[in-house]
Amino acid sequence: MKLIEFLQIAGVKLSSELQQDLLKTLIKKEYKKGDFFHKEGRVCKELGLLTKGQVALIHLVDGTEFTRWVGIKNTFITSLGSFINEIPSINGLQFLSDAEVEVMTKKDFDRLSRTYPEFQEFVVKAISQDLVKYQYLADLFITTKGTERYQKFQEKYPQLVKEVPQKYIATILGMNPRHLSRIRKKLASESK
C-alpha cells in the first residue's frame, strides 16, 4: 500500500504491527472524474491518501462553487473539520480526474491513533501542516494583490500550478480565471 511508503518517506518509524494493521485497514478505491469523495452537508467518515488523480475541496455559496484547495498525488483528502469533529461539512470533495485513493474509516483512524503513538504523532504533524497551509493562504488574501498573490502561490506550490487547471488555481486565489490568465501572460512576457 502507498500509505505505508508515504509514512516511511515522511520519517514515521512504523512498527511491524502498525504496518500489518494498516494493510488490513486500508481499502483501495477507484473514482471517476466528477465523482464525490464526500458531499457537503454530510459528516465525513473517511480519510484517504490520493495515489492517482486530482480532487477539489469545494464550497458552495449562493449556488456559486468555490475551490478552496486541490489535492494531487500523495495528498491526504478529507473534510478535516467534519472528519475530526464528526459534524456536517461545509465542503465537498469532487474528483477532477479519474482517481485512486487508499481509504480508512474514521473508526479505524481513531483506533490506530489510540493504539500506535507513532501514527498519532504523524497525524498531529499532518494536521499542523494543513493549518499552516490555510494560514498561509489567508495571509496571501490579506496582504497581497493579484500578481503578487499568484507569484507567492506559485513559489510555494509549484507542483499545483503545473498540474492543476488554471480555473481552479484562480478560484483558490480568489480571482476570476480571466484575471489570472492576464497575470500569467504579463509575467511570461516580462520574463522573456
Image: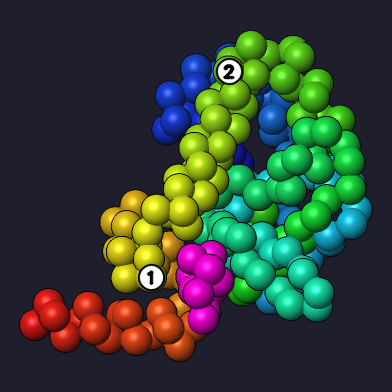
Q: Is residue 79 left or right of residue 127?
A: right
> What is the x, y in percent for residue 178?
45, 88
**Quadrant in which the N terminus appears:** top right
Say the numbered circle drawn on residue 69. Answer: none
To which quarter of the image does residue 9 belong? top left
> What is the x, y in percent for residue 169?
48, 70
To which quarter of the image does residue 155 belong? bottom left
Residue that numbered label 1 is attached to: 146
Whether residue 42 is in magenta: the answer is: no
| Of callouts 2 and 1, the N-terminal one | 2
Kindly state the secondary structure of the residue where label 1 is placed.
helix
Kindly state the secondary structure of the residue where label 2 is placed.
helix
Q: Amino acid at mark 1?
A: Gly
Q: Which residues are magenta?
A: 167-176
To which quarter of the image does residue 76 belong? top right
Q: Residue at x 74, y 77 (%)?
A: 64
Say if 149 sits above or below 182 in the image: above
Residue that numbered label 2 is attached to: 121
